[in-house]
Image (cartoon, rainbow, N blue to C red):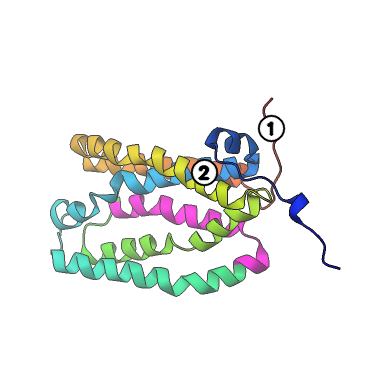
Amino acid sequence: MIADDSKHQKVAEASPIKLWHEMPYTLRNLLLSDILIRFCERIPDAFVVIWATRFIAQPVSELTFGFLSAIESITAVIIYFPVAYFADRFGKKRFVLITFLFFTSFPLVLLYSHSFDLLLVAFVVRGLKEFGEPTRKALIMDLAPEGRKTAMFGLYYLIRDVLVAFAAFGGALLWQHSPELNLKVAFVFGILGSIWFARYGSNESIEVEKAI
């Protein structure tokens, strides 16, 4: 006789506010860390090409910048599967934290990259920021409560992307003041996000009580 699991399934919830109250603290901590890390990424993102082709001591051509971008993509592709394999064996938190540290490192490495050789290192680091991205997405699903995984995934990205949209505007203001300041502020956001996740991040979901 086939068991009827329908009575154990939660009714679909469309309200972001109600979903937020059901989001476990462990997932909220990942979300906050991720927002800070994405600020680290987005603040300098639009200006990396300008930095490499205009501001450094030995600027590269636009064609060379395209080559550096290809190196970034190749680096990301190479590490995807090995990292996913080891994350399933040894736990996801450490791999997500390593990912955040690569995000954090890129603005600082770029700040001191004033030649092609150093830019090459910087773009390898930029590719390594994809180190645990599939693992982070899997962790979101692990931390989301049963019966709410798809909705929680959507809410997570809704909150993150809406807030991180302001980073590009802030990055433009910082760049107008000083390109170096832009990269330093991005680095600070990365440090904050990494520290928060190292302290409060988890591999386990803890349900929060619904607000009355």
Residue in the picture at 47% in, 71% down: 79
Q: Is residue 33 magenta?
A: no
Q: Residue furthest top?
A: 212
* Pointer 1 residue: 210
In the displayed structure, 116 sits above or below 52; it is below
Compare marks 1 and 2 and give the one earlier in the sequence.
2
Q: Residue furthest right?
A: 1
Residue placed most toward the observer, 105 or 164: 164
Disc 2 residue type? Leu
Number of disc labels: 2
Magenta segment, prevailing SS (helix, strand or loop): helix
User: Horizontal and vertical percent for residue 167?
Assistant: 33, 39
Q: Is residue 139 left or right of residue 56?
A: right
Q: Can residue 125 be seen in the rendering of this structure?
A: yes
Mark 2 Cα shell of 10 Å, populated few (<14), some (14-19), many (≥20): some
Disc 1 residue type? Lys
* Pointer 2 residue: 155
Secondary-structure class at tag 2: helix
In the displayed structure, 77 sits above or below 160; it is below
Q: Can residue 93 be seen in the rendering of this structure?
A: no
User: Horizontal and vertical percent for residue 125?
Assistant: 38, 62
Q: Quadrant of the N terminus?
A: bottom right
In the displayed structure, 93 sits above or below 76; it is above
Secondary-structure class at tag 1: loop
Q: Quadrant of the C terminus?
A: top right
Q: CA distance from mark 1 to mark 2?
A: 16 Å
Residue in the picture at 65% in, 61% down: 91
User: Horizontal and vertical percent for residue 178?
Assistant: 21, 38
Mark 1 Cα shell of 10 Å, populated few (<14), some (14-19), many (≥20): few
What is the span of residues highlighted in magenta in the rendered image? 87-110
